[in-house]
Image (cartoon, helix red, strand yellow):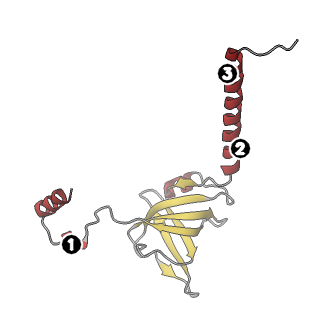
Amino acid sequence: MTAALKPKHQRLVLVVLAMVALIGAALLAIWGLRSNASYFYLPADIAAKPPTPDQAVRLGGMVETGSYKREADGVTIAFVVGDTKARVPVRFRGIVPDLFKEGSGVVAEGKLGEDGTFVADNLLAKHDEKYVPREMKAMTEAQARKTVEETK
């Protein structure tokens, strides 16, 4: 005598198994990505509570004017990223993005060194939010608005 499950119970078992599988997949994904997470810090955050030297982080802020220096090897640069509350020295070895310049925003990916210098593996330069295409630079605001309306 075999006791078969009623259809209602079969659906319940399938739903429970599906939920267990989804939770298991989510836990595996979180466990696998835990070492790849990169936290975003501002200079004030690093000054208040610095990350551990082995922790990969992103440092965002403004490149301070007068702080950009190219080292003798021609590939390494040093600059200071600051906000209104703190400053963090940064060292980067590699090709600098075209939009990277003093007085502009930057996001540096890397690790904080033992000496307090942020060693960047990658630089992301932020562009100006006031971008205007070449063709529209000479236009007045009214002409630019009319051109935009015509292109919709």
Query: How many marks are shown on the rendered structure?
Result: 3
From the viewer's perspective, is the residue at label 3 or at label 2 nearer? 3
Amino acid type indicated by mark 2: Leu
Q: Would you name the residue on which mark 3 appears?
A: 11
| Label 3 CA crowd tier, 10 Å (few <14, some 14–19, many 20+) | few
State how far apart marks 2 and 1 are (Cα): 51 Å
Quarter-wise, where is residue 14 in the image? top right
Q: Position of residue 77 (x, y in %)?
A: 53, 78
State how far apart marks 3 and 1 are (Cα): 63 Å
Q: Quadrant of the C terminus?
A: bottom left
Is residue 34 visible to the viewer in this orientation of the structure?
Answer: no
Q: Is residue 102 left or right of residue 111?
A: left
Does dot 3 land on a helix, a strand or a loop?
helix
For residue 135, the mark is 1
Q: Would you name the residue on which mark 2 appears?
A: 28
State how far apart marks 3 and 2 are (Cα): 26 Å
Amino acid type indicated by mark 1: Glu
30 or 60: nearer the viewer: 30
Extreme residue in the top direction:
1
